[in-house]
Image (spheres, rainbow, N blue to C red):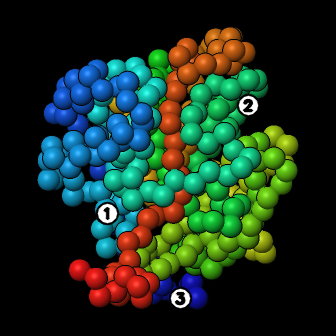
């Protein structure tokens, strides 16, 4: 029997409530593209303000309802995938839509000095790499930046172009651990792991984390990364005990239920980074074609171009927490 059977039971119950939402913005795409054709010469910050006003005026209330719910404990929404926002193959349009929606979902985007952060596409020597967003090979389920000292609440991706038709896959932890016993879950809930950086980081970073945490705002959150770097090995290792539990979860990945985004222009996906693990199969093109595109990469010609944001949730504080010189003003 586990040390705390009631905690394991509550844990199962809570994580089984998490769900993903699919939305279709096809009712807006024509108007968005007409607006874009007339206004795309303007600066991106101006376009963002215009698009934000458009969404606020024209979004259906049942769609707008989801924007402040992702990742919160009392809502149970861990991911939202929106398709048919636009169909024009335009990096500037895709970036404008991406940044506007990321803001509306309360994502506070951050960038590390070492990282090529925003655009994901085949970079030089991409055909030689897996476990890398700018590479050609598959990417194993993981949450982002667990080796960093900042906690990343959200990851968002927008498809500008994908002629390879390679979707982003995303996994609920419950579907990766549905073969664990109560004793094994008890071990998982109480264990620590060390997380180490990979190819995208210059140098070496690591952080020890609790694998499962809980707080009133987000509920249960997970720190899981099953990628294996060709140079430094497993990106996640148990600190003291529990490695056999992590290995059992890893063995489940190939057979686990999962969701996929829509791999076409105009798709926006946002996930709660520590409630969802994301992944990707090898791109659906030949390795020779990948090598050709990565040898001279451009945003205009790359077969798969996504824009990315990731970071903590934005918070808005009540007036009584404002500086004293603001208080009392209307």
The label nearer to you, 1 versus 3, is 1
Q: Position of residue 40 (x, y in %)?
A: 35, 25
The label nearer to you, 2 versus 1, is 1
- Mark 1 highlights which residue? 69
User: How far apart are labels 3 and 2 at the CA level?
Assistant: 43 Å
- Location of the C terminus by quadrant is bottom left
Q: Could you tell me which residue is drawn at 53 percent across and 16 percent down?
A: 300
Name the N-terminal-most of marks 3 and 2: 3
User: How far apart are labels 2 and 1 at the CA level?
Assistant: 36 Å
**Residue 300 vs residue 191: left or right?**
left
Instruction: Assess disc 3: are there few (<14), some (14-19) or many (≥20) residues with their C-alpha within 10 Å of its C-alpha.
Output: few
Name the N-terminal-most of marks 2 and 1: 1
* Quadrant housing residue 235: bottom right
User: Are the residues at dot 1 and dot 3 in contact (C-beta closer than 8 Å)?
Assistant: no
- Mark 3 highlights which residue? 4
Assign a secondary structure to mark 3.
Answer: loop
- Mark 2 highlights which residue? 129
**Residue 105 vs residue 142: left or right?**
left
Name the N-terminal-most of marks 1 and 3: 3
């Amino acid at each position: 029997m586990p040390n705390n059977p009631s905690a394991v039971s509550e844990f199962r119950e809570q994580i089984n409530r998490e769900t993903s939402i699919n939305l279709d913005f096809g009712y807006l795409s024509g108007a968005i593209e007409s607006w874009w054709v007339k206004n795309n010469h303007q600066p991106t910050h101006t376009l963002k303000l215009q698009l934000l006003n458009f969404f606020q005026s024209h979004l259906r209330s049942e769609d707008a309802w989801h924007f402040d719910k992702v990742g919160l404990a009392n809502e149970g929404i861990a991911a939202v995938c929106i398709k048919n926002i636009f169909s024009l193959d335009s990096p500037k349009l895709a970036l404008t839509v991406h940044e506007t929606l990321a803001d509306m979902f309360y994502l506070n985007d951050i960038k590390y000095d070492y990282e090529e952060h925003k655009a994901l596409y085949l970079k030089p020597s991409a055909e030689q790499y897996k476990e890398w967003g700018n590479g050609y090979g598959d990417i194993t389920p993981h949450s982002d930046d667990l080796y960093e000292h900042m906690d990343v609440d959200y990851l968002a991706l927008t498809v500008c172009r994908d002629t390879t038709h390679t979707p982003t896959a995303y996994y609920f932890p419950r579907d990766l651990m549905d073969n664990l016993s109560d004793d094994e879950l008890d071990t998982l809930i109480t264990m620590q792991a060390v997380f180490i950086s990979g190819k995208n980081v210059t140098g070496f970073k690591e952080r020890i984390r609790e694998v499962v945490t809980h707080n009133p705002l987000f509920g249960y959150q997970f720190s899981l990364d099953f990628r294996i770097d060709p140079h430094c090995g497993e990106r996640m290792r148990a600190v003291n005990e529990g490695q056999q539990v992590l290995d059992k979860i890893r063995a489940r990945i190939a057979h686990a239920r999962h969701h996929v985004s829509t791999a076409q222009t105009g798709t926006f996906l946002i996930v709660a980074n520590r409630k969802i693990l994301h992944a990707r199969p090898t791109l659906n093109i030949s390795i020779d074609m990948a090598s050709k595109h990565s040898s001279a990469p451009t945003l205009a010609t790359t077969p798969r171009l996504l824009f990315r944001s990731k970071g903590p949730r934005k918070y808005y504080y009540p007036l009584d927490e404002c500086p004293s010189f603001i208080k009392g003003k209307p």
